[in-house]
Image: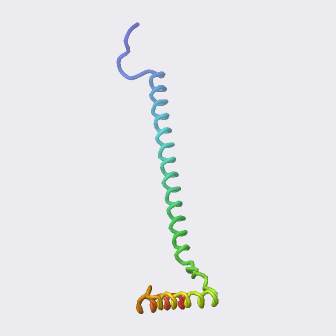
Amino acid sequence: MPMRRGRPGLFGTVARTAVIAGTATAVSGRVSQHSANKAAQQEQAAADQQQQQEAARQPAVPPPAAAPDDRIAKLKELGEMKSQGLLTDEEFAAEKARVLAT
């Protein structure tokens, strides 16, 4: 069979066009997928940031206050510990302030 010289024939042109079109389609699909992934990551980051801001706006819930009877019992216990010499005056004052603050 004789060898062709010069420009490619009809089938060669069609084959080349098919390869170029297939490559372009694959590249286009990857670019679209990459863009979609990037947009999803940005949305997730924005949602996380908004959630953190909302959590920061929530007021801190103070611990429940001790019942008056519990505080009196704790103060009596501290007084006994001080009279037994287990607590210094400074330790007693600090603990008493902590109990009364709750």
**What residue is drawn where x is 51% and y is 91%?**
79
Q: Nearer the viewer, residue 101 or 39?
A: 101
Looking at the image, is 74 positioned above or below residue 37?
Answer: below
**What residue is drawn where x is 43% and y is 88%?**
85
| Left/right of residue 64 with respect to residue 15 in the rendered view | right
In the rendered image, the residue lying farthest to the top is 1
Residue 43: % across, % down: 53, 61
**What residue is drawn where x is 54% and y is 87%?**
77
Quarter the C terminus occupies: bottom right
Residue 24: % across, % down: 47, 38
Residue 95: % across, % down: 48, 87
Color style of the picture: rainbow
Q: Nearer the viewer, residue 6 or 75?
A: 75
Q: Nearer the viewer, residue 78 or 29?
A: 78
Looking at the image, is 15 positioned above or below residue 43?
Answer: above
Give the image quarter of residue 68.
bottom right
| Left/right of residue 64 with respect to residue 97 in the rendered view | right
Q: Nearer the viewer, residue 67 or 47?
A: 67
Quarter the N terminus occupies: top left
Residue 22: % across, % down: 49, 34
Q: How many marks?
A: 0
Give the image quarter of residue 57.
bottom right
In the rendered image, the residue lying farthest to the left is 5
